[in-house]
Image (cartoon, grey):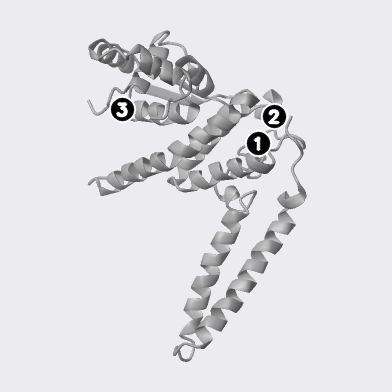
């Protein structure tokens, strides 16, 4: 496995695993994990590169919606299994680390 | 709603500024090379090269337009990228915030083409919806993580090209 399970990666995986079938977009994930969006993006990219996550652009008319299209992320079937296994085997992030991340100190 | 953008965003002004840079660059370059021992037309490629570099820098500095179009972000649709896609007349960033928007565009240019476009589009999408109070921090997080991400992306790109066998476009 080429993926390092940092605390931030674990937080993203946990958020995605809460409902593996649900698609989440960047801001939603950022709010769910407490990570800054700029920190979450490289993690999602890495997960996508590993085949754990798949993504797509939202199919909307930005003019009608009055906002840009969102990029939605979802765990793949294999990714969900691998993520669960990886999280089960990973060391649980310490409370202090999670608190720091929630306070916005989430730089990877 | 953010304060209205100033007239610097006017395309004609940008073109004029680029032309001014090129003219000034050519003048400086030709004056500098005048004292050298280059004979005949040997100086021409140097002047041309310098002009191109200066033009590139000038266009990059005018990041309200110019190369951003190359990224396909503001394009003809006007519905993508920082300058288009739903921006109302009073919705554009100004001052320090505008500087950061431009910073995002610059960082996206450090990345391989499609990856940079996607990063910028996604950053824009997130920053559009994020509460205003958190926007500056979010922009900073993108700016801080961008260069490192660019390095990783180029490394991937290099590995992709170094790999033997047919290359498939992503």
Chain letter for mark 3, please.
A
Closer to us: B145 or A100: A100
* Residue under the point 26% across and 15% down: A86
* Residue receiving disc 3: A50
Could you give the CA–CA distance between mark 3 and mark 1, rounded to whole angstroms? 31 Å
Q: Is residue A16 left or right of residue B2?
A: left
Above or below: residue B49 compared with residue A3: below
Are the residues at dot 3 and dot 1 in contact (C-beta closer than 8 Å)?
no
Could you give the CA–CA distance between mark 1 and mark 2, rounded to whole angstroms? 7 Å
Q: Secondary structure at mark 2?
A: helix
Query: Where residue B17 sits: x, y (%)?
Result: 68, 62
* Residue receiving disc 1: B79
Q: Secondary structure at mark 3?
A: loop
Above or below: residue B12 compared with residue B87: below
Q: Is residue B168 visible?
A: no
Q: Secondary structure at mark 1?
A: loop
| Residue B89 quadrant | top right
* Residue receiving disc 2: A63
Are the residues at dot 3 and dot 2 in contact (C-beta closer than 8 Å)?
no
Residues at marks 3 and 1 on the same chain: no
Q: Is residue A87 left or right of residue B89?
A: left
Query: Where residue A29 sits: x, y (%)?
Result: 48, 19
Query: Where residue B123 sits: x, y (%)?
Result: 54, 33
Closer to us: B45 or B147: B147
Could you give the CA–CA distance between mark 3 and mark 2, rounded to whole angstroms? 34 Å
Are the residues at dot 1 and dot 2 in contact (C-beta closer than 8 Å)?
yes
Q: Is residue A67 left or right of residue A4?
A: right
Q: Is residue B69 left or right of residue A1?
A: right
Chain letter for mark 1, please.
B
The residue most toward the top is A18
* Residue under the point 38% across and 13% down: A14
């Amino acid at each position: 496995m080429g993926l390092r399970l940092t605390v931030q990666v674990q937080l993203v995986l946990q958020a995605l695993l809460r409902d593996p079938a649900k698609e989440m977009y960047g801001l939603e994930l950022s709010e769910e994990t407490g990570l800054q969006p700029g920190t979450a993006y490289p993690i999602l990219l890495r997960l996508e590169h590993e085949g754990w996550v798949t993504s797509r652009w939202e199919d909307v008319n930005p003019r009608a919606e009055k906002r840009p299209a969102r990029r939605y992320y979802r765990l793949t079937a294999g990714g969900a299994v691998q993520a669960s296994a990886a999280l089960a085997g990973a060391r649980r992030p310490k409370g202090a680390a999670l608190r720091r991340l929630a306070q916005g100190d989430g730089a990877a | 709603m953010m304060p209205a953008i100033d007239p610097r965003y006017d395309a004609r002004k940008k073109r004029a500024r680029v032309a001014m840079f090129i003219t000034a660059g050519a003048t400086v370059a030709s004056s500098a090379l005048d004292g050298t021992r280059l004979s005949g037309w040997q100086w021409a490629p140097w002047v041309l090269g310098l002009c191109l570099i200066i033009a590139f820098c000038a266009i990059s500095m005018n990041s309200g337009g110019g190369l951003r179009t190359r990224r396909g972000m503001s394009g003809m649709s006007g519905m993508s990228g920082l300058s288009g896609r739903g921006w109302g007349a009073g919705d554009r960033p100004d001052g320090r915030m505008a500087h950061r928007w431009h910073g995002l565009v610059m960082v996206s240019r450090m990345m391989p083409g499609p990856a940079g476009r996607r990063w910028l589009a996604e950053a824009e999408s997130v920053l559009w919806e994020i509460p205003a109070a958190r926007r500056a921090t979010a922009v900073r997080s993108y700016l801080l993580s961008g260069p490192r991400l660019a390095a990783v992306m180029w490394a991937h790109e290099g590995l992709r090209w170094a790999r033997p066998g047919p290359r498939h476009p992503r």
